Amino acid sequence: MTTELTGPRRADRRRRAAPDGRPRRARRAAGRTGRRRRWPWWAEIPAMVVVGLLVALLIKTCLFQVFTIPSGSMENTLRIGDRVGVNKLSPLFGWEPKPGEPVVFKDPGDWLPAQATSGGNPLTGAVGDVLSFVGLVPPKDDNYLVKRVIATGGQTVQCSGTTLKVDGAPVSEPYLFRGDDSCAGMNFGPVTVPEGYVWVEGDHRSDSADSRYHQQERGGGAVPVENVVGPVSAVVWPLGHLDWFGWSGH
């Protein structure tokens, strides 16, 4: 037996079923027209990839760029295979290299041996070029070095015995590779660093072909500040060697 609701009770049920006063069918139609239209997956995925690459390129251009440590010249601060993040935002806000900071700089001229070009799969090579360009992987033609700034333009630097001096004052170097001293058997100086240049040396002093070995070249072994990409802010890989040097790199 069914009983038809009449009067106030029936009206109350209708109000609960349609609180906005519209029939259910009208509300469903309104929901469909107001819903965002989704792209098909085959169009949405490439669009997401493009957006991701553009964001990575923006980060590389203005914020951070990743470089790989290829040698032991900065051990044990930085080890072979470490990937370091370089703060590219600092120079935009007036940062300049300071003594004691590890920095990445472009080869000022023949500091690195010529790299042999190798063949390979053209497709994977092209993908690697794109990822390198946007900064997701280190540069393939990596002609960058990482060293520690010892002195800047106008300062004098020299090493004798086991003591490194800048402007005549001994420099404390707790970051040196264990077993090395500041000179590692190579006396030099005093050398006056030209304005607009920096004198750089590796923490593994006995395994670093740095400013000391290029004194016959332009700048007397010093590196132009314009070649400096920025300060090393962090070790970002591998996970077991994560380290943070700070926004300015020290």
Image: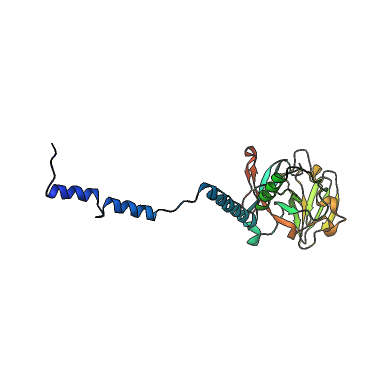
The colour scheme of the drawn protein is: rainbow
Q: Report the front residue among 128 and 151.
A: 128
Q: Where 184 falls versus 29 (above or below)? A: above
Residue 177: % across, % down? 75, 41
Which residue is pictured at 29% across the width and 51% down the height? 25
| Relative image position of residue 107 (x, y in whole percent) | 78, 53
Res 175 quadrant in image: top right
Q: Is residue 40 visible?
A: yes
Q: Position of residue 88 (x, y in %)?
A: 65, 56
Quadrant containing the N terminus in the rendered view: top left
Q: Residue at x 34, y 55 (%)?
A: 30
Residue at the right extreme, as displayed: 216
Residue 225 visible in the snapshot: no
Toward the viewer: 20 or 187? 20
Does residue 210 appear to the left or right of 135 in the view shown? right
Which percent across, then down, holds residue 49? 58, 50
Residue at the (68%, 49%) spot, across then down: 132
Q: Nearer the viewer, residue 109 or 242?
A: 109
| Count of number-bearing discs | 0
Instruction: Please indicate whether residue 128 sits to the left or right of residue 187 in the image.
Output: left
